[in-house]
Amino acid sequence: MKSLASLLTAALSLAGSLLASAALAQGASAPAPAASKAVEAAAPAAAAAKAPAAPAAATGDAMSGTAAWYGRKFNGRKTASGQRFNASAMTAAHPSLPFGSRVKVTNTKNKRSVVVVINDRGPSTPGRIVDVSQAAAQRLGFTRAGTTEVTLEVVGKVKMARAK
């Protein structure tokens, strides 16, 4: 199976070749500048594809947006980190924070806060920045509403146990 980087390089190379062919078909004697730039861009893009998906979060990093929660329906299913989901645990899903990040989530409407551990990826719904477990949502006071505005602040990191 080809790696993502090699697939990306091949796709950019093919795009460059197609652009060059189109330029030659229109009477140009040399490949179009965009074609050569696309091929040159393949190497840095391939290197970037090998970079870790989740950069290390610095303590104190903060962000705000909409949060939702997920619960018992997902109990026992594997999370992206390999751990089993537990709706009663203080956990959350975030699209880019590293697994094991400890994050203080504050409901901006009622000022309640909890600290959760990132152990999953998500949310997949546009406009949302975090999905918290049902237990966290209950402590934050938004289970009835389903979503709320929150602020997130990275407060540390825990060592994650690998699931089997």
Image: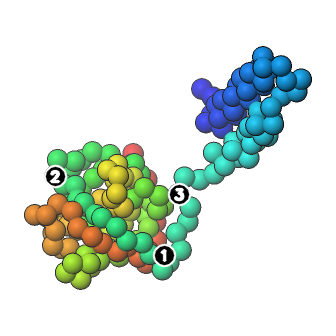
Give the x, y percent position of residue 86: 24, 56
In the image, residue 99 above or below residue 6: below
Q: Residues within 10 Å of mark 3 (few under 14, many from 20)?
A: few
Quadrant assignment for the C terminus: top left
Element on which disc 2 rests: helix
Q: Is residue 114 visible?
A: no
Give the x, y percent position of residue 77: 27, 45
Tell me the amino acid under the disc marked 1. Answer: Asp
Instruction: Please name the residue shown 56% across and 61% down the image.
Output: 55
Residue identified by numbered label 2: 72
Left or right position of 38 against 80: right
Which of the two discs, 2 and 3, labels the residue nearer the N terminus?
A: 3
Which of the two discs, 1 and 2, labels the residue nearer the N terminus?
A: 1
Foreground: disc 3 or disc 1: 1
Quadrant assignment for the N terminus: top right
Left or right position of 94 against 85: right
Considering depth in this image, is 7 or 86 the residue closer to the camera?
7
Q: Which mark is residue 54?
A: 3
Residue identified by numbered label 1: 61
Give the x, y percent position of residue 58: 53, 74
Tell me the amino acid under the disc marked 2. Answer: Arg
Q: Are marks 1 and 2 in contact (CB under 8 Å)?
A: no
Q: Are marks 2 and 3 in contact (CB under 8 Å)?
A: no
Q: Which mark is residue 92?
A: none
Instruction: Please name the residue shown 80% across and 31% down the image.
Output: 32
